[in-house]
Amino acid sequence: MTTMSEMPDLSQAAGWLPVAFMIVMGLAILAYVVLDGYDLGVGILAALAEPAERNMMVASIGPFWDANETWLVLGIGVLLTVFPLAHGIILGALYLPVAAMLLGLILRGVAFDFRIKAQAHRQPLWNAAFCAGSLLAAVAQGYMLGLLIVGFDRNPAHVAFAAFTGVALAAGYCLLGAGWLILKTESTLQLRALRWARVSLWLTAAGIVAVSVATPVVSPAIFAKWFSVPNIFLLAPVPFITAACIVTAEIALRRLPAQLAQRQERWAWVPFGLAVTLFVLAFHGLAYSLFPWLVPNRFDIWQAAAAPDSMLFIFVGVVIVLPLVIGYTVFAYRVFWGKATRLEY
Amino acid sequence: MPDPAALDAVLAARIQFAANISFHILFPALSIGLAWVLVYFKLRHDRGGGEHWLAAYRLWVKVFALCFAIGVVTGVTMSFQFGTNWPGFMLTVGNIAGPLLAYEVLTAFFLEATFLGVMLFGMKRVSNRTHTLATVLVAIGTTLSAFWILALNSWMQTPVGYRMEGGRAQATDWLAILFNPSFPYHFTHMLLACGLTVAFLVAGISAYRWRRGDRGADVEVALRSGVWLAAVLIPLQVVVGDLHGVNTYHHQPAKIAAMEGAWETTRGAPMVIFAVPDEATQSNRYELAIPGLASLYLGHSLDAEVRGLKEFPDAHPPVAPVFFAFRVMVGMGLLMLAVAWTAAWALRRGGTPGPRLTRVLVAMSFSGWVALIAGWYVTEIGRQPWLVQGLLRTAVAAADHPVGRIGLTLAMYLALYAVLLAAFVSVLFHLARKAGAEGQPGNAGGTAEPAIAAKAGIHGEPIGVAGPGSPLSRG
């Protein structure tokens, strides 16, 4: 086990740039997980829907999914370009799950178009590819997350843990997707989404609890980090807020059907909002646990970083362009604000 | 002596990467060209050109969306394979490749992906002007993406503006890196190739509709636009291609030697029209050549020196693939020139295309793809054994995954890509047939065939019956 390098001087470019990019990469991955998370979740749930409902579900994510997926490219791009040493090791260690995820993303990505544009007799096949691809991508991402937590060590217990995080992340995406549908659809589909949300909520909650309990068990380093003073007091509020979110979401999901029946949409955003909050909290806990490691116990962010000049050149671009990206992303979401309508062009 | 098993792993990694990037490039090439064609259709409509420009837009925007989706998802694959297949690449030149790729994501990917939503689905939700603006921004995004990726690729061919420190390249001059000696030629050559690919596709699919008796104004303007675009771009491409060759002659003589099939260094080198290069004997078999011509078009003098492959022992590319790919590209280019100018002549001053011309145009629908892939093989295989010319060998950069693992994922990708390519082509023709059926009053939806037969009868041109997805079966 290598030791971490000394905390570098953060007033130097070589010291603060890796931290800045860690934040950029973290935000990109968080944005990806939340944004592509809801559209992958809708993709998985589409397997349970009637054909007409399925079209409306796809319509609710159609204008957004391309840009949502770009956050993954940005996150991987930062890893590739700013932390090239870690990129090779992480993606090398995750070779097969990465391939499985890509297969899933390719299938569902092209199915968006093929499921409508192909000859009628081939459309059911593309619909199946759409749902299966969404599920495969979600499970593969969760599986990789599990392997990252255990430092890519593959003994049977760790693989089982990773398989479990795979299912848990897929459940979490379903919760996001169901929350999105409650927000963007109406009548029977909206009610159905409420039921999906309740089931997903409890699966997600079980996943969060199990991952939180298992993480310090499988990773001694994280155990040491969590259960030391003062960290234990600083971290203590996180599980409480998480529990509060889950309970509030359950209450909201029980009350919403009656309200929506009276066409009261005022609280329709609550399930999605709480699902996003749960993801932000879980992400925060995970990022805190892993920092400053990129490859647990092997490379920290300073050891894996590219040359300061190259980082600075990219950073200038990030500072100028990312606000623009966020600006026109907001614009695009405003254009398609409100309930989803049938897609045609 | 390198370990043979490791060499196999390198070959497997190369085949996998080549399969992915070959399949990937087909679709961005269409997106880049098609985006600007859509801007043109939209502007013609906005300037009062008539509803048929919008009808043409509506068909081709569907094709664009399909190409874009396939391009995005296969592009995501590429961003991962840089790491999984070539860890040594980022390790050695990551300080240069990294920022270029990062700027592609930041300036191009988000722009095109975000405004694509507005462009596809926002027509009724935003003003017409905003919608046209979204279309333009998507086109700019696709072209910017080509700019960054071609900057990186051309830098790998002609690396400048860096110094080596501890085995890693450090950037010293970003402008020199971006506008490296081969960049202007690579970038222009590629953009023209995208335009030509789309021009022949639009002309070919429109000719297909024309042959089916689907002869609305939208079909006619698309056919004319495709033919005229091809006729204008192809001579430009010939000139740029020649300049590109001269640039390669100065900077990558081993690649030129393989393209020309030149083994010996000679003055007054011949242009080899055909041969079978044999690496074992280091000579050409069945050679058919015109004396002096290669020196003329490369060195612009009949006795200019062309360096032969024997000057680059262990450092020249495999000869036959480069040699043949170059001839496929040039041959296809000449064919495109002949077809485009013949078609433009036939269509001048409101002329209509005859059955023979439309048949040729349908057959040429995917000619751009053939030339494009052949051209990329020339430039990429021609760079071997280097990954970055003179700086990093491909074999050094490869990951040491077991061959079986690469083979497994390679088989998966190949199967997937075969399905996707077949699906794309069949859906393309399906969309073309459907567009014709929807244009018929009282025939929205339903099957297209009866309407088409009736329509063909009106125009008095006998057409056979083709099965779905078999465009060439119509005689």
Image: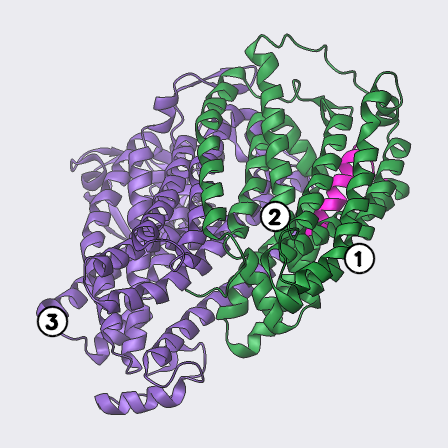
User: Which quadrant: the N terminus of chain A?
Assistant: top right
Q: Is residue A152 visible?
A: no
Residue at horizontal 75 percent and vertical 26 percent from the top: A288
Q: Chain of mark 3?
A: B
> Which label number is shown at residue B350?
3
Distance Cα–Cα, label 2 vs label 1: 20 Å
Q: Are marks 1 and 3 in contact (CB under 8 Å)?
A: no
Distance Cα–Cα, label 1 vs label 3: 65 Å
Residue labelled with disc 1 = A199
Residue at horizontal 38 percent and vertical 18 percent from the top: B173
Distance Cα–Cα, label 3 vs label 2: 50 Å
Q: Which residues are magenta?
A: A137-154
Question: Which amino acid is tagged 2?
Answer: Asp
SS under mark 2: helix
Q: Are marks 3 and 2 in contact (CB under 8 Å)?
A: no
SS under mark 1: helix
The image quadrant that residue B419 belongs to is bottom right
Residue labelled with disc 2 = A36
Question: Which amino acid is tagged 1?
Answer: Val
